[in-house]
Amino acid sequence: MRRSAVTLLAAGLVACSSGGGVPPIGDGKDSGPGSDAATKDAAADVATSDAASDGGSDASDANASDAGGPTFVDVADTTCQGLASDAGAVLVAGPGAPRFTTTAAVSSRRFAASEDQVLTFDTDGANAGAPFAPPAIDAIVAASEGSAIAVASLNSGAVGFTRYDASGAVTLATQTLQASTPAGDPALAIASRSGASLVVWRQGTNLRGLEYTTSAGATVDFGASTFGSSVDVSAAPTSNGYVVAWTGDPGDGTYRLRFTTWGATSNVTVSYKQTAPMHVVRIVPAASGSGWAALVNSEFPQAAVLLVPLDASGNVSGSIRRYLGATYAWDVASSNAGYALVARRATNEPEWRSLTTSGDGQSSWVCLDGSLGNQIGGSAVDSDGTLWATVYSTQNGGASFVRLDSTGTP
């Protein structure tokens, strides 16, 4: 589950100063795509790998690469080009539409999911059904198994798993993965591949996960004592398994982005750390074809959207990109052509941008709709062939869909 959008919205509305273990935003000359300048800060540490364990001692910090830390590249802001008023297809009329932050293809259709509802529709945005969810839930996450929508859910007494078809009909009634309320501030993630899904949730001082295929597999606890009062977690499928990334502060005032591979969860990599609060939003395959990319929102004292490149083991493998003109991000997607990013602008519009395979700006920012004002809003993006399928909150409180090419043209 993503860190509270209310918290991130508040962070984005604060005028932030530099500091917090990362270089000041805007260092260097970055006048546009392809002209981004790198900066460094010795206080921003990159760790190698947590080879011993993922326990509270965080043994890998002793081997951190402290001489200079990671390189940051500030990707320049641009003017925000607007969409034509008739470019998007209305999914849910406002006001009060779900705040969708996930979208994916399912069978010959597509779905979008918020933290409490799912919606299916045609690939062009037509024929949207009514939003649905498992009964009596507090929060959900959803992913595509190809021909089914996999939904993991939390309620006051259980962790559940449900499957739906492309029309929203139940194909697997809710299965109880844990018949008790998970301990601690809730966190929930799901990653799916054909016929199988990994569900990960917070259970007290560690993360807990299991794979559901035709039935629930054994639960595995990992990440013990790697976070304190809260944790953010994201997962992604591989060809034969999954990877998991999470962020949290174990209580020493330093937030860490950590990475592990399902099936080898005793091996945890501390990918990146900083003293400013940060929240992983999504982990996706690297557009370069090797490794991963983690989308991270950084909070006080300076709000920033980061794309952290990782190798197959979770170590930082290049410059961390920061996107000027974005207060916080909702989602990122990747393909062999690059990335697409959706975020909230400082002036509160939902915005979209295509990126190169290295994470630099390819298109200018595209404002998907007008200012959301005090609405929390949401947006999601997914690769759709040579296009990018995008769901977004609208100024009137609705939700719409559009497909954009790499230039931001519908």
Image (tube, rainbow, N blue to C red):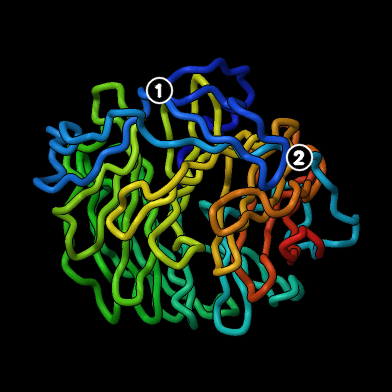
For image coordinates 67% across by 35% down, the residue present is 30
| Up-down relation of residue 129 to residue 171 (above or below) | above
Residue 67 percent across, percent down from the top left: 30, 28
Residue 206 seen:
yes
Q: Residue furthest left?
A: 52
Q: Is residue 68 left or right of residue 8?
A: left
Asked if 297 appears above or below 331 in the picture, the reply is above
| Kind of residue at disc 2 | Thr
Q: Nearer the viewer, residue 396 or 27?
A: 27
Read off the residue under disc 1.
21
Q: Residue at x 35, y 76 (%)?
A: 239
Residue at 45%, 67% (x, y): give it. Answer: 289
The residue lying toward the viewer, choosing from 40 and 58, is 40
Q: What number of labels is visible?
A: 2
Residue 240: percent from the left, percent from the top? Answer: 30, 76
3D distance between C-alphas at marks 2 and 1:
26 Å
Q: Residues within 10 Å of mark 1 (few under 14, many from 20)?
A: some
Report the disc number at residue 78.
Answer: 2
Splitting the image into 4 quarters, where does residue 410 fall? Answer: bottom right
Determine the secondary structure under disc 2. Answer: loop
- Can residue 117 be seen in the rendering of this structure? no
Query: Dot 2, crowdedness within 10 Å: few (<14), some or many (≥20)?
Result: some
Q: Which of marks 1 and 2 precedes in the sequence?
A: 1
Image-based side of 139 in relation to 31, left or right: left
Q: Which of the two residues, 111 or 173, is positioned nearer the viewer here?
A: 111
Which amino acid lies under the numbered mark 1 shown in the image of this protein?
Gly
Asked if the residue under mark 1 is in contact with the one under mark 2, i.e. CB atoms within 8 Å, the reply is: no
